[in-house]
Image (cartoon, helix red, strand yellow):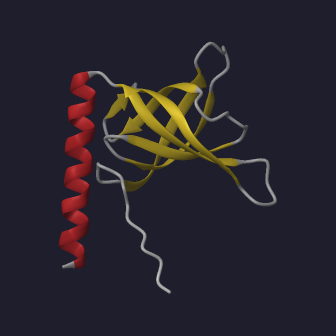
Amino acid sequence: MPINWEDKRRNPRVNIRTPLTYRVRGEPRSQSTVCDNISAGGLSFTGERFVPSQATLMLEVSLLSRVLYPVGRVMWVSPLPHSDRNRIGVKFLEFPGSEMKYLEDYTNNAQKNIFKRKG
């Protein structure tokens, strides 16, 4: 029987490998990693340490010529097999208006370019 799977995301997600720094709100130590994908609604990355679901993260995302500074909430954590690393999904909670517009333009243009290449 086929699985009826539907992507429930509201925003187009773009696969990207770009620098990301994150810090759990209230903790002094930040971690650097690479963002795996991003949309106007959130992002995902692989972290070296466990971050609990529902934790609030202060983020710095390098996207082309700008650095974006959203605040997000961890929505899911998935341990990677045979590793201490975790895949982490984050939903944006706070995002300065001009930065959000920049991200929306970026993801919409990236999606248009993907469809042009497929078509």
Name the image quarter holding residue 4: bottom left
In the rendered image, residue 8, in percent from the top left (x then y), is placed at: 36, 55
In the rendered image, residue 39, in percent from the top left (x then y), is placed at: 34, 46
Number of labels in the image equals 0
Is 114 left or right of 92, judged from the image as shown?
A: left
Front in this rendered view, residue 101 or 64? 101
Front in this rendered view, residue 118 or 54? 54
Which residue appears at 40% of the width and 27% of the height?
93
Q: Residue furthest bottom?
A: 1
Image quarter (top left, top right, bottom left or bottom right) of the C terminus: bottom left
Is 35 left or right of 103, judged from the image as shown?
A: right
Is 8 left or right of 51, judged from the image as shown?
A: left
In the rendered image, residue 97, in percent from the top left (x then y), is placed at: 23, 23
Q: Residue furthest front?
A: 1
Relative to 21, say whether 46 is above or below. Answer: below
Relative to 60, say whether 81 is above or below. Answer: below
In the rendered image, residue 91, in percent from the top left (x then y), is placed at: 44, 37
Which residue appears at 59% of the width and 24% of the height?
23
Which residue appears at 42% of the width and 69% of the height?
5
Which residue appears at 27% of the width and 39% of the height?
103
